[in-house]
Image (cartoon, rainbow, N blue to C red):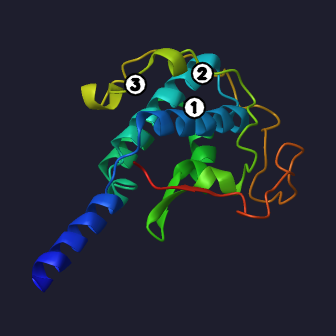
């Protein structure tokens, strides 16, 4: 009887640790992350649409701790490489809250973007059109879906990049409202 109870408890812990993210949660987190990427990387409207789709596909594909930086994370980064310019992609990789958007801590997910942007209600851009219509799945169609898709990119490197960079530790006017009770991080148990 004790073995059966232990086995049942292990199954419950495994299920909760490997629960997938709901579509609604993935959609909202992809929007927040993509909006900040659009702002800091100076994305065109077409890039913003594609980045939202890529982030949504990634978040919907994460079913557990091992997925956070596994196959779907690698697919996300490859897709982003097709959509971003060289300087945008290099900057993206230098920003850990963009490059590694999820962390598994103490049995739940932490969305790393909230360590940099604590006001979850502030957006720089209007919602992309894909927010209302895209249900996910481009990452499962082909590993070259975004390589074969024409996306308008900025003509050149901008003279001034938005947001903070590694050497500028002063918060900008949009990130000065840090929440003291959660240190700007949002955690969630996916259900």
Q: Is residue 62 left or right of residue 81?
A: left
x and y percentages locating residue 51 in the rendered image? 52, 30
Disc number at residue 153?
2
x and y percentages locating residue 17 in the rendered image? 34, 62
Residue that carries the numbered disc 3 in the rendered image? 146
Disc on the earlier residue, 2 or 1: 1
Contact (CB < 8 A) between labels 2 and 1? yes
Task: Decide which of 4, 105 is in the foreground and name it.
Answer: 4
Residue that carries the numbered disc 1 in the rendered image? 85
Q: Residue at x 76, y 52 (%)?
A: 165
Q: Is residue 138 left or right of residue 5?
A: right
Q: CA distance from mark 2 to mark 3?
A: 13 Å
Q: Is residue 123 left or right of residue 103?
A: right
Q: CA distance from mark 3 to mark 1?
A: 13 Å
The kind of secondary structure element at disc 1 is loop
Q: Residues within 10 Å of mark 2 (few under 14, many from 20)?
A: some
Q: Residue at x 37, y 26 (%)?
A: 136
């Amino acid at each position: 009887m004790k073995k059966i109870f232990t086995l049942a408890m292990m199954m419950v812990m495994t299920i909760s640790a490997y629960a997938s993210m709901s579509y609604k949660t993935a959609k909202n987190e992809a929007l927040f992350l993509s909006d900040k990427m659009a702002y800091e990387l100076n994305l065109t409207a077409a890039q913003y649409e594609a980045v939202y789709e890529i982030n949504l596909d990634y978040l919907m594909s994460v079913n557990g701790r091992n997925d956070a930086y596994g196959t779907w994370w690698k697919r996300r980064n490859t897709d982003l490489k097709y959509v971003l310019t060289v300087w945008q992609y290099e900057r993206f990789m230098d920003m850990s809250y963009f490059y590694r958007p999820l962390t598994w801590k103490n049995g739940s997910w932490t969305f790393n973007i909230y360590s940099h942007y604590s006001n979850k209600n502030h957006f720089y851009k209007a919602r992309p059109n894909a927010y209302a219509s895209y249900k996910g799945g481009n990452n499962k169609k082909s590993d070259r879906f975004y390589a074969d898709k024409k996306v308008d990119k900025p003509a050149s490197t901008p003279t001034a990049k938005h947001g903070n960079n590694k050497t500028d530790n002063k918060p900008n006017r949009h990130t000065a409202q840090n929440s003291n009770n959660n240190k700007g991080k949002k955690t969630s148990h996916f259900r």
